[in-house]
Amino acid sequence: KQEVTQIPAALSVPEGENLVLNCSFTDSAIYNLQWFRQDPGKGLTSLLLIQSSQREQTSGRLNASLDKSSGRSTLYIAASQPGDSATYLCAVRNRDDKIIFGKGTRLHILP
Amino acid sequence: GEEVAQTPKHLVRGEGQKAKLYCAPIKGHSYVFWYQQVLKNEFKFLISFQNENVFDETGMPKERFSAKCLPNSPCSLEIQATKLEDSAVYFCASSRRAKQETQYFGPGTRLLVL
């Protein structure tokens, strides 16, 4: 059974710092891995989607990596801003098409 | 439309009442997914559709929950005889294809069962 773990559960960093969020999964037989952002009381915004054959994806200040064999992904946020404060969720799509979410990392950027 | 639309935004029901939630996927998207977020970050897959056909319903509770996606109508998720533990945010997502495609999420419907 696929399990997705996100560490840390919560993180506070001063504005301007670079930071890394971690995601690990137990079953490497995945189609893809996706990072989402969820603002309080809102839905999910897709940030980056990495296919199983890819190693990383970049969008602006965000970079996501995938090491399928070790069951790990990281989301790197450069030059953090207060507007980056949100919950970041990692989700893997299994070969049976099910999407399994981690519990998220609550990020707070201190002005 | 360009966004997944969900209605209503909020729904309050007394225990035992019926609840019906609606989702309009992005135009051109063939797949629709329903998720339940009970605690803050506990997402649970419920059911998916390929057009009007059930694609995967392994996450659906066997009793009380049903869902439909009919042509030219919003998809719906219905809960008969709601229970307190059904209180959650229900998210709908759509994608062009099931595999290897980004799912786009709606804003969710917050269901409160009293």
Image: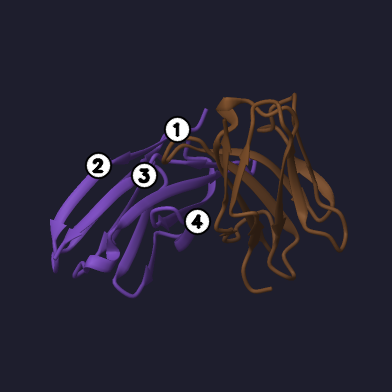
Chain colours: A purple, B brown
The reply to the same-chain question for discs 2 and 1 is: yes
The reply to the same-chain question for discs 3 and 4 is: yes
Nearer-N-terminus badge (2/3): 2
Q: Which residue is at a point 27% across and 40% down the rendered structure image?
A: A9
Name the one closer to the observer, A66 or A39. Answer: A39
Give the residue at mark 4. A43
Helix, strand or loop under label 1 = loop
Q: Quadrant of residue B14?
A: top right
Tag nearer the camera, 1 or 3: 3
Residue A4, percent across and down?
42, 37
Nearer-N-terminus badge (1/3): 1
Cα–Cα span, label 1 and label 4: 22 Å
Q: Are marks 4 and 2 in contact (CB under 8 Å)?
A: no
Q: Quadrant of residue A58?
A: bottom left
Helix, strand or loop under label 2 = loop
Amino acid, disc 4: Gly
Cα–Cα span, label 2 and label 1: 16 Å
Give the residue at mark 2. A8
The reply to the same-chain question for discs 4 and 2 is: yes
The reply to the same-chain question for discs 1 and 3 is: yes
Q: Which residue is at a point 60% across and 43% down the rendered structure image?
A: B35
Give the residue at mark 1. A3
Cα–Cα span, label 2 and label 3: 8 Å
Nearer-N-terminus badge (2/1): 1
Q: Which residue is at a point 22% across and 69% down the rendered structure image?
A: A81
Cα–Cα span, label 1 and label 3: 13 Å
Tag nearer the camera, 3 or 4: 4
Name the one closer to the observer, A84 or B5. Answer: B5
